[in-house]
Structure formats: C-alpha cells, structure tokens
C-alpha cells in the first residue's frame, strides 16, 4: 500500500536518505536491531549531567554572597539569571541542529570547559559585568553539553530509549538538589574566592566526558569503516500535520510541568514560612526533600519502554493533579508528604516527553533534545519571574492555589497520536 504523501518525509526537509543526519544513522532503527545497552556509557553521561547541573544550581545559591560582596541590586540579580537562562536555553536548539549534521564526540567535554571558565571567573569577578559574563559562560557550557549528551544516552541505550533518557535525567536532577547543599558546606566563610573550589566539579566532568567522547568517536569510526552506509531514512510515524500538532501539545505539557516546578522550586520556602511559620532552616530541609524526590525520573523511562510513552505522560502530568490541588489545603506534615509524591510523579514526565518527541522526528535527535531542554530551561526562568511578580501583588497563597490546577493541562495528552510500535507477535 502506498503511504500518504506526507508520510516518509522529514519535518525539515524533503524525503530520501539525505534527510537522515550522520549521527542519526548510528542510532538503532528498532529494538530488535539494537545492540546491547552500553550501561557504563549511560552512567557516565548521567554522572556528567549531575556535575553540569550541580554548577547550574550553584549559581542561585551564591546570589546572596555576590550581592553582599559586590553591592548588587535585586534588578542586577535578575539580569544575572537572565544572562544564564538566555545562553542555557536559546542556544541549545542551534547546537542540536549543528551536531545533527556534524557529530562532535568531544562536545560534552568542551561544554564543561566553558563551565570551568565560568566558575573561575565567578570566583574572581569584581564587577557586575564580569559576573554577567561568568553566568553566560555557565549557561553556554550547559547548551553545548545537553543536546549531544542526550544523543549519546540514546545511542548507548540498545533500544531501551526511555530507560537511558531517565537515567540521564536522574543525574541532572540529583545535581540540581546537590548544588545548594555543596554551597552551604563549601562557602562556610561566605568568601567569594571560595567559589574557586567548585572548579573541581567541571574538571572532573572534563576527565569523565573525554572518555565518553572517545567511545562516541569509536562508534563514528566503526560506522565509517563499514563504508558509512546510510540506512534508509526513518519515515515520520504520522503525517507532518499531526507531528506539528503533537509537538505543540508536548510544549504545552512542558509549560504546565515547569511552571509548576518553578512555583515549588523558587517559592516553596517562602510558602512554608508564610503558612506554617517554620524557620528558614526547616523550610530549606523541606525544599531539599522535594528536590531529591524530583530525582524519581528513573520511574518514567522503564515504564514507558514497556507500556508506551503516552501512558507515562498521562500519568505523570494529569495523574499528579489531585496531589497538587490538595497541597494548598494540607497541614505541614501532609504538605511535605504531598510535595515528595508530586516531585516523584511529575519528574517522570520529562524523559517520556523527550523520547516521544525524538520518535516523532527520528532523524533530528539533536534538534529535538536541544529544543526541549532549552524550552524547559527558559520556562523555568520565565515562570520564576512571572510568579514572583504575581506573588508580590496577590500573595504567595494565591500563587499556590492558582498553580495547583496547571497539571489539568495533561488532559491535552488525548490529542497525542499513538506512535509506539506494537510488539512482535509470538509464534
């Protein structure tokens, strides 16, 4: 049967072999044809993700120190966040597009080099402009790291794409929780020069990810040694129009997830102090429990591999709504318990969403990874700013009541096409 005219085409180009990027040709075309899972490589890029996101989460943790030592205003603090978010989000799709066509085995380590320079500059900066430049370099390092690291995790997955992406995400979430704790331990004397100790983190990342780069380069070399034969380009699983519609739905779901996470991540301590009159130390402990729970991303990947990504998206976005709606009315104990449940369930959505999007456009893994990682970063920054403005005018309680309904946008999952391949029949 002849496929519809819109199927079998790339979203961004015409049809035929030329549409499949050089890096995409290395990816297994089906689980049956996939090589064994390279678990050590997935663990290595996950550890690299932990190191990268540790430095990212360090930046907000040292704002009070920078403000005191350099005499910065809150407006200048906001501009530092903007500089970081712009380079960390807007550049990722561009990096993904480039590496789709020109794979860069050592780009993961190169990203850590930018981060290293940014950390050293933060420890030495004596002007606001220098701090802006340092924050931008940390964001640039993240932009270079994420798209190709996500591709390496997929390449090493052996067809277990959800599992690999979830394990990769766990590293990043753990780093986000670890950064503020390390800042509290290392910066005991509240001296800006002590930030230089954090240079050890990207240095470890460079050493680790250089080894991953050698593995990736070997995969490319083996492909070229075989004559560099291009597999036939994988067709889009559904028509181009449905792919665009599905991407739009996924972006709305990312919006609901990261706006809600911005609400909890940025203002949770203020909410607890305001509602329950707890100390700052107690509030920070509750925040750490929530951030640690977000590392539950590992759940979504294996479940998605076995039962389908769409079911995980249903369960992790819409399924968390009863807990988020109950949170503003709970006492202190149940607020802590609900926040842990919300963190575990909601965090499992991202790996399922990104793998689903990669399977919508199978020949543009780098672009899809960069787009969704960048969009997530951008929404986190925008969400924090908008919710802060709203909290100033309407109160923190109103913010939590309003945001509690965001997961209901998970109802839009009904419009996502079923693209998972059915299991092969047993004989």
Image (spheres, grey):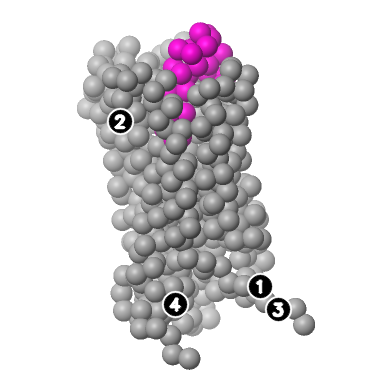
Task: Measure how far apart labels 1 and 4 are at the Cα level.
Answer: 19 Å
Of callouts 4 and 2, the N-terminal one: 4
Residue 222 percent coordinates (x, y): 54, 73
Q: Nearer the viewer, mark 4 or mark 2?
A: 2
Q: Which residue is mark 3?
A: 425
Residues marked 3 and 4 touching at CB (< 8 Å): no
Q: For mark 2, does the 10 Å Cα neighbourhood hold few (<14), some (14 to 19), or many (20 or more) residues?
A: few
Point out which mark residue 423 bears: 1
> Which residue is found at the position 46% from the left and 82% from the top?
232
Of callouts 2 and 1, the N-terminal one: 2
Tell me the element at label 3: loop
Res 73 → quadrant? top left
Tell me the element at label 2: helix
Q: For mark 4, does the 10 Å Cα neighbourhood hold few (<14), some (14 to 19), or many (20 or more) residues?
A: many
Q: Is residue 201 magenta?
A: no
Q: Which residue is mark 4?
A: 235
Front in this rendered view, residue 346 or 165: 346
Most common secondary structure along the magenta stretch: helix
Point out which mark residue 200 bears: none
Residue 392 percent coordinates (x, y): 30, 19
The magenta-colored residue range is 260-286
Q: Which residue is mark 2?
A: 386
Task: Measure how far apart labels 2 and 1 are at the Cα level.
Answer: 45 Å
């Amino acid at each position: 049967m002849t496929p519809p005219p819109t199927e079998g085409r790339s979203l961004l180009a015409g049809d035929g072999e030329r549409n499949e990027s050089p890096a995409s040709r290395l990816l297994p075309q089906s689980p049956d044809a996939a090589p064994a899972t390279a678990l050590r490589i997935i663990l290595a890029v996950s550890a690299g993700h932990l190191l990268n996101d540790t430095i990212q989460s360090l930046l907000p943790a040292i704002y009070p120190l920078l403000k005191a030592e350099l005499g910065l205003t809150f407006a200048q603090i906001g501009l530092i966040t903007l500089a970081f978010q712009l380079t960390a989000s807007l550049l990722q799709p561009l990096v993904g597009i480039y590496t789709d066509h020109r794979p860069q085995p050592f780009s993961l380590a190169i990203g850590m080099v930018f981060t290293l320079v940014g950390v050293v500059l933060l420890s030495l900066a004596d002007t606001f402009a220098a701090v802006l430049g340092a924050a931008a370099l940390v964001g640039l390092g993240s932009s270079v790291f994420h798209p190709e690291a996500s591709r390496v995790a997929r390449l090493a997955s052996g067809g277990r794409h959800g599992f690999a992406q979830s394990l990769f995400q766990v590293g990043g979430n753990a780093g986000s929780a670890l950064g503020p704790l390390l800042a509290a331990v290392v910066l005991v004397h509240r001296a800006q020069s002590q930030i230089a100790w954090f240079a050890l983190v990207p240095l470890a990342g460079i050493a680790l990810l250089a080894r991953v780069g050698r593995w990736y380069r070997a995969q490319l070399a083996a492909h070229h040694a075989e004559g560099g034969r291009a597999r036939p380009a994988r067709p889009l699983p559904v028509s181009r129009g449905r792919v665009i519609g599905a991407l739009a739905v996924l972006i709305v779901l990312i919006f609901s997830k990261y706006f809600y996470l911005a609400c909890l991540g940025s203002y949770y301590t203020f909410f607890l102090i305001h509602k329950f009159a707890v100390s700052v130390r107690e509030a920070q402990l509750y925040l750490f429990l929530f951030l640690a729970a977000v590392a539950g991303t590992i759940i979504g990947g294996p479940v998605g591999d076995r039962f389908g990504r769409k079911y995980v998206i249903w369960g992790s976005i819409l399924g968390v709504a009863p807990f988020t709606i109950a949170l503003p009315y709970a006492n202190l104990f149940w607020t802590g318990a609900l926040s842990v449940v919300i963190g575990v369930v909601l965090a499992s959505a991202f790996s399922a969403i990104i793998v689903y999007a990669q399977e919508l456009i199978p020949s543009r893994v780098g672009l899809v990874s960069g787009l969704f990682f960048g969009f997530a970063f951008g929404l986190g920054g925008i969400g924090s700013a908008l919710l802060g403005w709203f909290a100033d005018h309407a109160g923190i309680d109103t913010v939590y009541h309003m945001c509690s309904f965001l997961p209901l946008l998970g109802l839009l999952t009904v419009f996502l096409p079923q693209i998972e391949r059915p299991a092969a029949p047993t004989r």
